[in-house]
Amino acid sequence: MITNDLWYEAVDANVELTQGDIILNCPVVRWASKSVEVSNQTEIETLRSLVEVAEIDLVVITQGCDLENKKVNNVILCPHFALSQYQENWEQAMNNMKQNPTAKAWGRYCDDIKNGYIWNLSMLNEGEIGNLKLTHRIVDFHDVYTLPRTFLESFLQNKQESRLRLRPPYREHLSQAFARFFMRVGLPTGVKKVW
């Protein structure tokens, strides 16, 4: 049995939502991956035709104090994937680029994610508390979802399942990684080196 009570705590379904909550198989609205053409339809009809609903594993990014004090109507969430699932996608991408996806390259890539060198990704440790179990996960900041807070709270109540929650400082570490990704500034020219 994995004991990782440093990273996670288990909370009941009736416990209020907060930053770092791990929500599995959550329905979200997202944009379909298909080409977009505004032709005979209006822009509104075109956008409506691109909407789809999917079930995704998510982690709550919205600050806990904003959720606790009901200062937000919508909750920011990011998807997370099992490390094994992410590895399959990585290997496929490497093959598509005509590169050899070796175990050594995968290990370096995971180290880079863990150490924060790949800006759009963050790694969560595995954890197990009672019957709640989570393998290593990759959080991807490229896709950011929002759901109404009331919908999310109702969804969790209806599921009536306990969930894992990141504990401090791990949830703040994830929040910091999210902020680093969005605060990057690329300069057209760097500082001229004169030393």
Image (cartoon, rainbow, N blue to C red):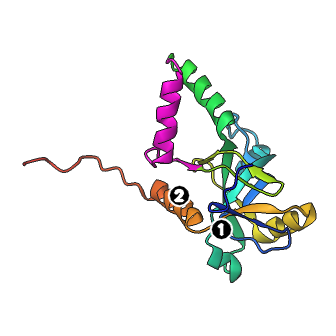
Q: Residue 193 carries which label?
A: none
What span is colored magenta in the figure? 99-123
Q: What residue is rendered at 75% in x and 39% in y? A: 40
The residue nearer to you, when weighing 152 against 174, is: 174
Mark carried by residue 178: 2
Going 83% across and 66% down the picture, which residue do you hit?
151
Q: Residues within 10 Å of mark 2 (few under 14, many from 20)?
A: many
Q: Is residue 53 above or below residue 147?
A: above
Residue at horizontal 64%, vertical 39%? 83
Number of numbered discs on residues:
2
Residue 14: image location, x then y, percent: 85, 73
Q: Is residue 11 above or below residue 57?
A: below
Is 41 on the left or on the right of 91, as rendered? Answer: right
Q: Which amino acid does label 2 sit on?
A: Phe
Q: In which quarter of the image is residue 89?
A: top right
Query: In the rendered view, does 194 fall on the left or right side of 151?
Result: left
Any part of residue 19 in sight: yes
Is the C-beta separation of discs 1 and 2 under 8 Å?
Answer: no
Image coordinates of residue 82 in percent, x first then y, are: 69, 41
Quadrant assignment, res 163: bottom right
Q: Where is residue 77 in the image (x, y as percent from the top left)?
A: 67, 58
Q: Position of residue 157 (x, y in %)?
A: 89, 68
Q: Which mark is residue 19?
A: 1
Q: Tell me if residue 160 is in the magenta stretch.
A: no
| Up/down of 21 relative to 132, above or below | below
- Furthest residue to the left? 195
Mark 2 element type: helix
**Label 1 Cα neighbours within 10 Å, binned few <14 / some 14-19 / many ≥20:** many
